[in-house]
Image: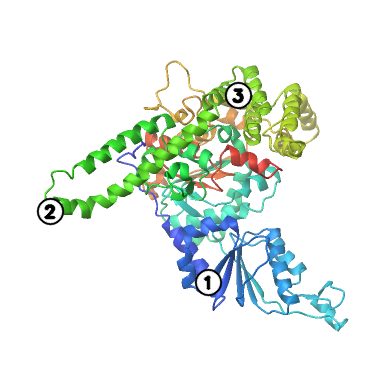
Amino acid sequence: MAFPHRPDAPELPDFSMLKRLARDQLIYLLEQLPGKKDLFIEADLMSPLDRIANVSILKQHEVDKLYKVENKPVFSTSEQLCFLVRPRIRNMRYIANLVNADKMAGRSRKYKVIFSPQKFYACEMVLEEEGIYGALCMVSYHGWLEDSSCQHCHPWLLFTPTDVSCDEWAFSLLPLDVDLLSMELPEFFRDYFLEGNQRWINTVAQALHLISNLYGPFANCYGIGRCAKMVYEMWRELEEEEEGEIKGRKPEIGHIFLLDRDVDFVTALCSQVVYEGLVDDTFRIKCGSVDFGPDVTSSDKSLKVLLNAQDKVFNEIRNEHFSNVFGFLSQKARNLQAQYDRRRGMDIKQMKNFVSQELKGLKQEHRLLSLHIGACESIMKKKTKQDFQELIKTEHALLEGFNIRESTSYIEEHIDRQVSPIESLRLMCLLSITENGLVPKDYRSLKTQYLQSYGPEHLLTFSNLRRTGLLTEQVPGDTLTAVENKVSKLVTDKAAGKITDAFSSLAKRSNFRGISKKLGLIPRGDSEYDLKVPRDMAYVFSGAYIPLSCRIIEQVLERKSWLGLEEVVRLLNGNEFAVTDTIPEENAPSDSLRLVLVVFLGGCTFSEISALRFLGRERGYRFIFLTTAVTNSARLMEAMSEVKT
């Protein structure tokens, strides 16, 4: 079970330093507002903040009361208010309304806005427009906003000195586990891949710059995807500005691989069957912890549980296929009972040693074991109710390209029974991507049935899915190619290449069948797949499919380049890069060359993490994961949906 690390596996860097840096910076920012203050925290930042600085630490630095940023009246008696928020326009409106309400009431306070992970000019502009920040003033009786230079012309203007200050908390890397870093930016996916908003590119580049400053430069850099390329180029600019500071340092991590989420939508759309993935799909792991309800805890209370390598029971089953987990937990329970039974026949001295040295650990293990058994039972109940086996069978048929008509009928039935709007969308997207778009007749039929079943308010969601390439309608195969050929005759080769890229972007063709064949993503069915002793990464999807993202990483690391993968790259719409031997291998510690940092832009799934952990054990690598956020199929669909549940 649990894929133990090879005896020769390299040690992972100590990422706890990132937590200490974030905590120290936050304390410094809070102390810039001396004296007692109330802290308003945006909901999205509450869980990450709790992992960095708990309430007692905040209290030590004169934070009196904590409030959640929400659309409600504020009843704070403090003379100083501090706001810890994401750089969002709606937050600026909230703060401006609060400050202006205080002004109307004749109340004077100090206000500090801390943006995390960075502040944007647009947010400061909103605060200025609202007249609470910067060199702006209020007209005494018209209520307009004017520039301060107007005072000479209009002495009747009333200038209000601002007590609002702005700063940023560059907290963009949260260690969720020994090998998992998250930026906790779930909006990255929608912002970039749907709306084309590049505001987070600099944030990711800054995060990579911080890692290279703390843990040394990378010997080899690989990547694929438009976003990956932009991040890499911006990151290199930051590195070049401070090249002297890290030059000559030995790397702790040898390789870095950047990958866009839209390179592989298929993996993210599949149902997860490794234990950690199923826990995420069923209970929603948030910021490395999960809320287990009374049905799991066997009590009348819910319990928040941290899921990481420190949980010994969880660490042994997290990467396992779910079919193996019950057997393991049963054996673990028997072993635990045997250790308890050792108490019989002990003399007083032995009993004293047992109580002082072992009993506490056994009780903790027993508590964790009970929780994970309860979680498994709850998962089984929910999946049996959903007819999970039939669902998995349909997904496998779509991945393999068999029984497409039967799979389409299954999706139609799913919609008609109104099982779940998110699940129905997911299956439609999986059908679309694996088939390189739906034939017009099926597209129109499924869309009509969906809107009739779940409501016309979902119409905009279909537009979003189409724009991202998740759910598209097939067009005549040669249309785009013909246009590209005509264009290429009229312009230079270089310009033609750029225009072809633009057409590829508009087409958003998945080419999944061709890619799957080239990379061997569907294992041969010569014999039954042994999930207890998996032979490849396909075990994370019951032996039916090797995650495309993981296969790409495996192939590039094996070749140390994209050579031999030209056809795959073409089918993936290009934007690949490889910058190797930036540090001579003799200058890089041998252990560092077996450490790989994989950066997922737009989110990664626990299935991909489990698959790469397996690959690392097989090939002698250890993978470290940096993601904009942990995702799954439901989160992906919710990001595209215009109907909020």
Q: Residues within 10 Å of mark 1 (few under 14, many from 20)?
A: many
x, y percent for residue 324: 39, 30
Residue extending furthest top? 526
For discs 2 and 3, the disc positioned in front in the rendered view: 2
Q: Nearest the camera: 442 or 59?
A: 59
- The residue depicted at 53 percent of the width and 38 percent of the height is 281
Query: Disc 3 marks which residue?
Result: 514
Q: Is residue 405 above or below residue 264?
A: above
N-terminal-most mark, 3 or 1:
1
User: Would you say 364 lies left or right of 24 here?
Assistant: left
Q: Amino acid at mark 1?
A: Val
Q: Is residue 542 above or below residue 622?
A: above
Query: Disc 1 marks which residue?
Result: 63
Label 3, secondary structure: give it. helix
Quarter-of-image position of residue 375: top left
Can residue 133 be seen in the rendering of this structure? no
Q: Amino acid at mark 2?
A: Lys
User: Would you say 301 lies left or right of 93 here?
Assistant: left
N-terminal-most mark, 1 or 2:
1
For discs 1 and 2, the disc positioned in front in the rendered view: 2
Can residue 211 be seen in the rendering of this structure? yes
Quarter-of-image position of residue 146: bottom right
Q: CA distance from mark 1 to mark 2?
A: 49 Å
Label 2, secondary structure: give it. helix
Answer whether labels 3 and 1 touch (C-beta < 8 Å): no
Q: Is residue 614 above or below residue 220?
A: above
Q: Nearest the camera: 321 or 589?
A: 321
Q: Amino acid at mark 3?
A: Gly
User: Would you say 408 lies left or right of 373 here?
Assistant: right
Query: Disc 2 marks which residue?
Result: 349
Q: CA distance from mark 2 to mark 3?
A: 69 Å
